[in-house]
Image (cartoon, helix red, strand yellow):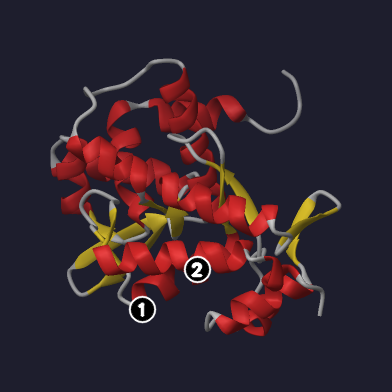
Amino acid sequence: MKEGPDIARIAALIGDPARANILTALMTGKALTATELAQEAGVTPQTASAHLAKLHDSGLLLQRKQGRHRYFSLASDDVAHVLEGLMGLATLSGHLRTRPGPRDLALRRARVCYNHLAGEAGTQLYAALTGAGHIAAKGEDLALTPRGVALMSGFGIDVNALARARAPVCRECLDWSERRSHLAGSLGRALLARIEDLGWARRNQATRVVAFSATGESAFNAFLAEALNPKSRADE
């Protein structure tokens, strides 16, 4: 037997249709009960409990108990990152479970990828920030540049607090529908939270859709324009 990571075990856990549905449902970033996840998976509560135990024991899920209910969530950004990549591979390979429809269009426009903005809106944001030099490669990692720090601070994000956290500030995540990158990491999470705090958009917990209001869409586009403005790219 070859040594190294056992990818076959992880692949088998994710590859079961019921467990795949459970994991996909948790891509909203919201913790769900065992009963809710049984409904998402289309299985009985007893069967769901068995699946949840396997996912939890393998480190893919976190579990916490509150009152009579057990709540489950994805264990980390890494799990969400892998799931998003698999969604992209399935889409690229033509393995789709439903015909495209209005919900698919909304998901492609803007959605939650665990805790950050994905879809067309997410890739537009990432392209603006990297293209204008607010985020740059630092070795194999990504980092905010001084101009990026200034832009984020002006947008109401505490960059120093992000830097003190254990999670990476900037992380690239391949978008399954756009086949381009969107922004993950603590900055991606903070940007989505700020967009919601400003009332530009609201997330639909049942579908992962992030719905921008007409005013919010205009404000979001104005922020992208500000990021791309040559004045915002002037070195401090």
Q: Is residue 218 left or right of residue 178?
A: left
- Label 2 sits on a secondary structure element that is helix
Amino acid tagged 1: Asp
Frontmost of labels 2 and 1 is: 2
Quadrant housing the N terminus: top right
Which residue in the protein does label 2 denote? Answer: 223
Residue 23 visible to the viewer: no
Amino acid type at circle 2 is: Phe
Q: x, y (%) of residue 124?
A: 51, 50
In the image: residue 105, left or right of residue 2: left
Q: What element carries label 1?
A: helix
Residue 156, horizontal then vertical, whole percent: 52, 84
Q: Do the residues labelled 2 and 1 touch (CB within 8 Å)?
A: no
Badge 1 density bin: few <14, some 14–19, many ≥20, Cα 10 Å: few
> For the residues marked 2 and 1, what is the alpha-carbon distance in whole angstroms?
15 Å
Where's residue 150, x and y in %? 68, 79
**Occupied quadrant, residue 180:** top right
Q: Name the one closer to the observer, 127 or 39.
A: 127
Which residue does the image show at 68% across and 83% down from the upper left?
160
Q: Circle 2: is it few (<14), some (14-19), or many (20+) Cα within 10 Å?
A: some
Q: Which residue is drawn at 22% across and 53% down?
A: 34
Q: Can residue 112 be seen in this view?
A: yes
Residue at 52 percent of width and 47 percent of height: 123
Image quadrant assignment for residue 90: top left
Of labels 2 and 1, earlier in sequence is: 1
Please state which of residues 65 and 113 is positioned toward the viewer in this rendering: 113
Q: In this view, does 4 lie above or below 93?
A: below
Q: Which residue is drawn at 39% across and 15% down?
A: 94
The residue lying toward the viewer, choosing from 137 and 236, is: 236
Q: Residue 197 carries which label?
A: 1
